[in-house]
Image (cartoon, rainbow, N blue to C red):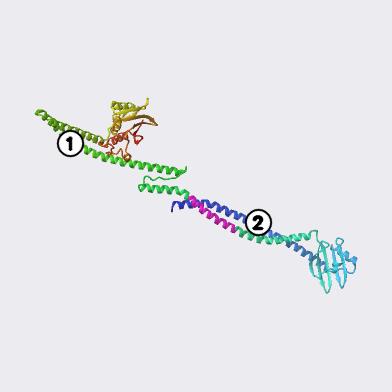
Amino acid sequence: MLFRTRIFGVIFIVGMLPAVILLSVSAYLLNSTLDRVGASGLESSVEAARSMVDDTESKLGEMLADFLSDKIPWSDGEDLDSWRDSKKLDLVYRKSDGSLNRSVSDTLEIDERFFEDLPIISGLQHLEIDGNPVLIISRADSGIIEGCGLLMPEGYADKGRRLSNAVSATASLSIYKDFSVQLISAVTGASLIFILIAGFILSRLISRRLVKPLEKLAAGAGKLGAGDLDYRVDISGNDEFAGLAESFNKMASEISENQKKLIQTERLAAWREVARRIAHEIKNPLTPITVELYRLKGMLAESGGDASEITKALDSINSQIKALQELAGHFSTFAKEPELRKQKCSVADTLTRTIGLYSNLENVSITNSIPENLSTVEMDPQMMSRVFGNIIKNSLEASPESVEIDIKVERENNNIKIVFKDDGPGFPPEKMENIDTPYITTKKSGTGLGLAIINKIIDEHGGELRLYNDSGAVVEISLPIR
């Protein structure tokens, strides 16, 4: 499984799990609330209240029916009133063949037309007489209507209507509850789908953002492993990935620098081996040739003849032999590892003594800026004097007539920096990259070993050599104080 996939899975689960749990708990609580609002207990209570009212009315109807079963004194009005009072009724009546016997309590005022319009209905019924609710039970038989009734409490009709409305509302509440549960289920499902989609997208974006720096580092490692030492990873920010990228780039730079140094070291080693062999091959025949020249000169001197032309030729041969010997000496010097004898000494003193060797020449003007109390340096004064002399000599040989050389010395952090600047033609741009490589020279008669030897000695001192042009050649040497 890819690392990005694992990161995506972890972010998705960690991010979505609380949301899913919260959504599930919210849906459960809302559904429970609806259950409590529309609970069967409420419906049962409303139905029980209605049933209680119906039972009460039924019992009252049975009581009124029993009263009608008694022997009622319909013929005598006073006896009828007494009977009604004894039964605590508010109304009793009998209608037969156009005749009407009735008895009404003082709390009711009933018009005669009420009895005329009274429908022939048997059973319990609710009537409203002058705005007063009356519960009446009647029976009809062979054109005779008998009935009795009770005046119900004030507001009984309104309470009945409210009870009916409550029963209707309770019945509709179950429908609303079912609809609400369906709505909650739909909203919960839609929300869950939305959360999952949003979580999927956000998790992908976040995981890609987290893994992208690692992918860049992996790509950089691949490039580096393939040999592209100039490849660098570009990761901005102040987090650990940016620090890792910086370390990676620093490592790549060090690898590239070390590889260059390794190549240069191998190249120098090869050149040293070549120089050693060349010096050996040149020195071997030069020694007997030189001996024979001295013998020839001696023989000519002893003969006493005119041998001026021969002597001149022999002197020319001898000068060429000395040049070859000097060249062989350069080769030998380059082939050997510098045997440094380091000691604490002053760069200023060493440089001043070297400048003094060239100050009397007519074709050179040397100015210098050397501060007092300059720190001492661990170095080999003879080797460094040789370095300073070779730099001045190169400026003289590169200039056709005369040259001005400006030398500045200064402390820079924990280093002593020495800068040689002349007004000569400078280094050729096409040879700047390999100017310190053996056998690369800008002079017609040069061997190309001077700057290579200088670079080698400075490197053995732990310093750095820098070459560039600035209205002439500039050689910059940096030596560590410690």
Per the image, label 1 sits on a secondary structure element best described as: helix
Q: Quadrant of the N terminus?
A: bottom left
Q: Which mark is residue 36?
A: 2
Magenta range: 185-207
Left or right of 468 on screen, residue 136: right
Q: Which circle, 2 or 1, is nearer the viewer?
A: 1
Give the x, y percent position of residue 13: 51, 52
Is residue 193 visible in this depiction of the protein?
yes
From what the image shows, is residue 165 above or below residue 368? below
Q: Which mark is residue 327?
A: none
For label 1, count other residues whose C-alpha is less than 10 Å away and answer few (under 14), some (14-19) or many (20+): few
Give the x, y percent position of residue 368: 35, 27
From what the image shows, is residue 275 above or below residue 170? above
Q: Residue at x 39, y 41 (%)?
A: 250
Q: Quadrant of residue 298?
A: top left
Amino acid tagged 1: Asn
Report which residue position mark 1 lands on: 284
Q: Main secondary structure of the magenta part?
A: helix
Q: Quadrant of residue 457?
A: top left
Q: Residue at x 83, y 66 (%)?
A: 148
Amino acid tagged 2: Arg
Left or right of 196 on screen, residue 114: right
Along the line of sight, the residue nearer the viewer: 418 or 225: 418
Residue at the far bottom: name it.
142
For label 2, count other residues whose C-alpha is less than 10 Å away and answer few (under 14), some (14-19) or many (20+): few
From what the image shows, is residue 134 above or below residue 234? below
Give the x, y percent position of residue 170: 69, 60
Per the image, label 2 sits on a secondary structure element best described as: helix
Q: CA distance from mark 2 to mark 1?
A: 118 Å
Is residue 463 visible in this depiction of the protein?
no
Q: Earlier in the sequence, mark 2 or mark 1?
A: 2
Left or right of 327 on screen, residue 7: right
